[in-house]
Image (cartoon, rainbow, N blue to C red):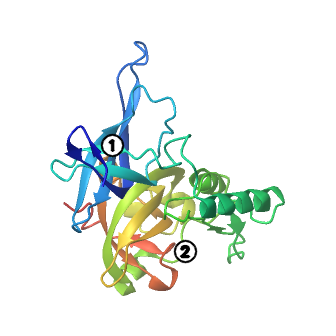
């Protein structure tokens, strides 16, 4: 285990769950800091902040929803960047297997063999869905969120597959942590004008989450969902939700139980 300045630092992986800007752009002190959820060697999970390394020109900033390598101090849960991680350090060497995968993905994309979003079969209304791509670490693949938002706003993609109320009644219940949330520029009225009148003005959002259900390892999911107007202020990365999942299509079919969400 590495040591520095008399302290013990343990390597681990962490999920970036929130970010904010700090400092002043006018004074040249602008930076970002992030909240990272770390699963320690003892099996416990904790969250701690970590700041942009002030004098490190080799640093790659991270995004909410990314899983990165990190080092933590087991005494106080302080975090520091793992400089062996090519996701955050431009001088770090990418492992051979990952480099080979990246090269193949690049070649495939250049040749048109793997489009960023693959159209799904047309639905009864003539519109298609999009097959969302996740990276190997479970985070959304680059460009996916923007691609889906654009498809919904342009009307090329349906945002609802089945009724959330039905899924809440028949699905597998669990919890989900928001990794990203983006407004889609549409309301329930735009999607289904025959919906419950009390919901017609609720905005539609695109969520990416990490879902936990009994007997399963946590897994990522992406889905469009209405957000009650009274709940908008509580939507942010890191917020926990009560959900129900169709386990046959667990990465896409998730319903939020707004009566119980957000969870404490």
Residue 243 makes an appearance in the image: yes
Residue 251 in the image: state x and y as whole percent: 50, 73
User: What's the residue at 30%, 64% (across, down)?
Assistant: 241
Mark seen at residue 80: 1
Residue 138 in the image: state x and y as whole percent: 49, 65
Residue 24 sits in quarter? top left
Q: Is residue 82 above or below residue 29?
A: below
Residue 52 vs residue 194: left or right? left
N-terminal label among 1 and 2: 1
User: What's the residue at 27%, 49% (across, down)?
Assistant: 9
Between 201 and 88, the one nearer to me in the picture: 88
Between 137 and 184, the one nearer to me in the picture: 137
The residue beneath circle 2 is: 161
Between 101 and 125, the one nearer to me in the picture: 101
**Mark 1 → mark 2, Cα distance in angstroms:** 42 Å
- Asked whether disc 1 touches disc 2, contact meaning CB atoms under 8 Å apart, the reply is no
Residue 239 makes an appearance in the image: no
The local secondary structure at tag 2 comes to: loop
Residue 242 in the image: state x and y as whole percent: 29, 69
Residue 67 in the image: state x and y as whole percent: 44, 56
User: What's the residue at 39%, 32% (across, down)?
Assistant: 53
Q: Residues within 10 Å of mark 2 (few under 14, many from 20)?
A: some
User: What's the residue at 68%, 76% (across, down)?
Assistant: 123
Q: Is residue 45 above or below residue 252?
A: above
């Amino acid at each position: 285990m590495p040591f520095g300045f008399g302290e013990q630092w343990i390597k681990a992986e962490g999920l970036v769950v929130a970010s904010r800007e700090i400092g002043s752009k006018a004074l040249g002190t602008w930076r970002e800091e992030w909240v990272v959820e770390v699963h320690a060697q003892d099996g416990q999970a904790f969250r701690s902040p970590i700041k942009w390394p002030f004098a490190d020109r080799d640093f790659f900033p991270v995004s909410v929803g990314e899983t990165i390598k990190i080092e933590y101090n087991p005494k106080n849960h302080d975090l520091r960047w793992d400089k062996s991680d090519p996701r955050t350090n431009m001088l770090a060497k990418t492992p051979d297997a990952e480099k080979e995968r990246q090269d193949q993905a690049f070649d495939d994309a250049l040749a048109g063999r793997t489009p960023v979003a693959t159209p799904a079969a047309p639905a009864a209304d003539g519109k298609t869905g999009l097959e969302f791509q996740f990276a190997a670490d479970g985070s959304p693949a680059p460009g996916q969120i923007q691609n889906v938002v654009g498809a919904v706003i342009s009307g090329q993609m349906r945002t609802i597959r089945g009724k959330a109320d039905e899924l809440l009644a028949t699905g597998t219940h669990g919890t989900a942590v928001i990794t990203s949330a983006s407004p889609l520029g549409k309301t329930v009225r735009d999607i289904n004008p025959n919906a419950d009148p009390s919901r017609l003005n609720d905005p539609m959002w695109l969520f990416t989450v990490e879902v936990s259900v009994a007997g399963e390892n946590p897994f990522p999911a992406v889905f469009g969902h209405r957000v009650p107007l009274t709940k908008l202020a509580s939507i942010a990365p890191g917020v926990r939700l009560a959900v129900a999942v169709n386990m046959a299509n667990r990465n896409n079919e998730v319903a939020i139980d707004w009566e119980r969400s957000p969870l404490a």
